[in-house]
Image: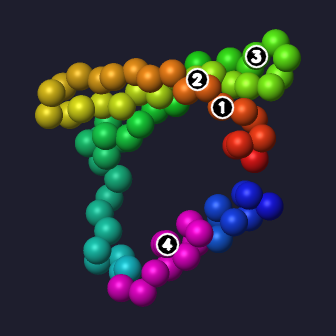
């Protein structure tokens, strides 16, 4: 159910009035570098949680920061 709601919200956002092809731009390397990156997911031995790293890049300072996130798999569904 959560995935359906997420899909509907994304569809509504991309089809919002006033959004036209002229307002968008091609995906660039700069866009890719500015995105947060998830890596190294590890499931706990009891299967009740997942830990992963999230890298956020500061393009102006030319460096990145890493944060650890601990979530319950049910929170992702």
Quadrant of the rendering where the N terminus is positioned: bottom right
> Residue at label 3?
44
Compare residues 65 and 20 and report the one nearer the observer: 65
Q: Residue at x 85, y 17 (%)?
A: 46
Measured in 3D between alpha carbons, the distance from the residue under mark 4 to the one under mark 2, in whole angstroms, is 28 Å
Q: Nearer the viewer, mark 1 or mark 4?
A: 1
Q: Classify 5 as above or below 3.
A: below
Callout 4: SS = helix
Callout 3: SS = loop
Compare residues 30 and 64 and report the one nearer the observer: 64
Q: Which mark is residue 13?
A: 4
Residue 38 can be seen, yes or no: yes
> Residue at label 2?
52
**Quarter of the image where one finds residue 74:** top right
Disc nearer the start of the sequence (1/4): 4
Q: Residue at x 74, y 58 (%)?
A: 2
> Residue at label 1?
71
Q: Which mark is residue 60?
A: none
**Label 1 crowd bin: few (<14), some (14–19), many (20+), radius 10 Å:** some
The residue stretch that appears in magenta = 9-18
Measured in 3D between alpha carbons, the distance from the residue under mark 3 to the one under mark 4, in whole angstroms, is 35 Å
In this rendering, would 25 be left or right of 52? left
Q: Position of residue 60 (x, y in %)?
A: 14, 34
Q: Residue at x 68, y 18 (%)?
A: 42
Callout 2: SS = strand
Measured in 3D between alpha carbons, the distance from the residue under mark 1 to the one under mark 2, in whole angstroms, is 9 Å
């Amino acid at each position: 159910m959560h995935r359906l709601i997420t899909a509907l919200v994304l569809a509504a956002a991309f089809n919002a009035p006033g959004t036209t092809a002229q307002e968008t731009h091609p995906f660039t390397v700069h866009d890719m570098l500015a995105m947060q990156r998830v890596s190294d997911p590890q499931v706990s031995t009891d299967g009740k949680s997942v830990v992963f790293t999230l890298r956020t890049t500061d393009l102006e300072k030319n460096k990145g920061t890493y944060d650890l996130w601990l979530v319950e798999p049910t929170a992702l569904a």
